[in-house]
Image (tube, rainbow, N blue to C red):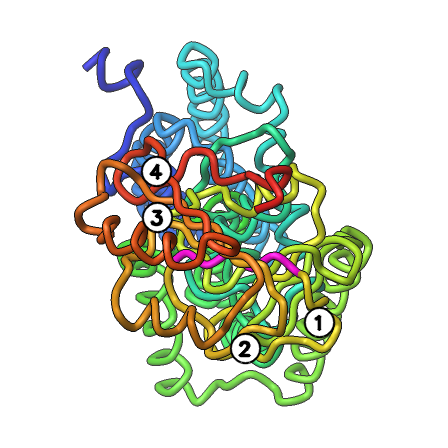
């Protein structure tokens, strides 16, 4: 029992990293849902709500999730503001004693100390996420927000990895384009319009508080990306839908405009903050990313993280070279100079500009690749291959090809693990 109460962070979902925060989000919604008991006329419901809420609160504090605790507090405060339930004196005294016991337990468990130190990584991720809204209006790609942060925003030298922006809403907005962002904001506006109580009905008040708790918990972590976290909020939504249909009590249409206006204001505010925090060296467009002042010195076509490493953009920024990153099919801008350096690590572009310099990393010397190089006729080709994969990369064919072009081709073997080239930031080698 002591190990359960004072051991590591409580997590009943066991879904990997950040799972304790997801468990806390479920528990926070469950704690707030107990408010329904306090809004009933019969006092026995009050005592049931107190006992159940106290047990769930112990579990919530055991998760040590700051976001979950803050979310539960927000939901409870909303219930108090909307309904202001009358609590009998005996129940009030018992509740105060229970709150004091929870405070003591949280202190002994080291929970409140977590609120006293700052989390610089979370603030950095949030600032970068806001900047992405402005820097990448088309979105950075589903599942790519943390990688985009590591490549283009993370402080040089900081090579810690993250799975998300530690904020579900911001992570979702950054990964999608403007139309999807607007739809997301309007969806939350519609939800608020539908569940918000015009009168102090216990079910409507409880549902609004649960959804607020769910929303706030998702601000502090990526909690809403598993279905288990959605079960209780969706259950309250279903209950509200049934209640409104049965009682023919639907929200007023005039309040819909207020909800839409609030959603638009929030979205504009977030993008304004993104503009303020945006990186002057970074710009994106369809299929391309620019870093530094044009014209680009380096063009990276279809970067392969397996070859260049998970921090290839990070390393590029450290080199202080201006660069252009192109995805397959993207058009080559007119400002790319003829002598720009092209880095190829997998997919090959259809055609290179004249007199381009080319560096290929761990690409097999297939007949298609060699024929492609002959058609491009670049001024210089530098090929780097991992000696551990020499056979798979057809190294003999590469060296034979290099012997045929001694003035323009240079092939070398280096150490490395599989496809990864550990020394790929070679910008000063001038191949």
The magenta region covers 340-345
Across and down, in percent, residue 288 comes to 59, 69
Query: Which of 159/256 is in front?
Result: 159
Closer to us: mark 3 or mark 4? Answer: 4
Query: Which of 318/23 is in front?
Result: 318
Disc 2, disc 4: CB below 8 Å?
no
Q: Secondary structure at mark 1?
A: helix
Q: Which residue is mark 4?
A: 413
Magenta-colored stretch includes residue 341: yes
Sequence-earlier tag: 2 or 4: 2
**Residue shown at 42% from the left, 27% from the top:** 64
Tell me the CA gap for discs 2 and 3. Answer: 21 Å
Q: Quadrant of residue 413?
A: top left
Q: Which residue is mark 3?
A: 306
**Residue shown at 73% from the left, 64% from the top:** 271
The numbered dot on residue 330 is: 2
Horizontally, residue 262 falls left or right of residue 101, namely right
Magenta-colored stretch includes residue 5: no
């Amino acid at each position: 029992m002591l190990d359960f109460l004072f051991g590591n962070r409580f997590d009943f979902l066991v879904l990997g990293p950040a799972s304790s925060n997801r468990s806390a989000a479920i528990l926070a919604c469950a704690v707030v849902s107990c408010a329904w008991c306090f809004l009933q006329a019969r006092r026995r419901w009050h005592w049931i709500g107190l006992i159940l809420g106290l047990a769930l609160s112990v579990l919530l504090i055991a998760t040590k999730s700051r976001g979950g605790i803050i979310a539960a507090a927000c939901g409870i405060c909303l219930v108090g503001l909307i309904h202001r339930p009358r609590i009998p004196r005996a129940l009030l005294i018992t509740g105060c004693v229970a709150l004091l016991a929870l405070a003591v337990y949280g202190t002994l468990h080291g929970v409140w100390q977590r609120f006293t130190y700052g989390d610089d990584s979370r603030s950095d991720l949030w600032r970068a996420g806001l900047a992405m809204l402005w820097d990448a209006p088309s979105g950075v790609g589903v599942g790519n927000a943390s990688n985009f942060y590591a490549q283009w925003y993370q402080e040089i030298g900081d090579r810690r990895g993250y799975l998300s922006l530690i904020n579900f809403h911001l992570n979702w907005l950054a990964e999608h384009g403007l139309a999807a962002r607007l739809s997301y904001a309007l969806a939350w506006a519609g939800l608020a319009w539908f569940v918000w109580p015009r009168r102090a009905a216990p079910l409507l008040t409880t549902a609004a508080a649960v959804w607020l708790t769910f929303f706030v918990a998702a601000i502090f972590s990526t909690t809403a990306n598993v279905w288990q976290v959605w079960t209780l909020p969706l259950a309250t939504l279903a209950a509200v839908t049934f209640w409104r249909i049965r009682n023919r009590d639907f929200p007023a249409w005039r309040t819909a405009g207020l909800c839409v206006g609030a959603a638009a204001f929030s979205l504009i505010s977030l993008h304004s903050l993104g503009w303020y925090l945006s990186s002057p060296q970074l710009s994106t467009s369809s299929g391309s990313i620019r870093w530094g002042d044009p014209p680009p010195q380096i063009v990276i076509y279809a970067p392969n993280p397996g070859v260049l490493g998970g921090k290839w953009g990070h390393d590029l920024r450290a080199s202080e070279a201006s660069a252009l990153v192109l995805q397959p099919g993207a058009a080559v801008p007119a400002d790319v100079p003829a002598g720009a350096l092209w880095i190829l690590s997998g997919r090959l572009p259809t055609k290179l500009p004249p007199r381009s310099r080319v560096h290929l990393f761990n690409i097999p010397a297939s007949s298609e690749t060699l024929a492609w190089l002959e058609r491009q006729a670049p001024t210089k080709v530098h090929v780097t291959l991992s000696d551990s994969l020499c056979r798979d990369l057809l190294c003999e064919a590469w060296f034979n090809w290099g012997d045929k072009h001694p003035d323009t081709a240079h092939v070398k073997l280096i150490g490395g693990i599989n496809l990864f080239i550990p020394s790929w930031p070679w910008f000063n080698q001038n191949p």
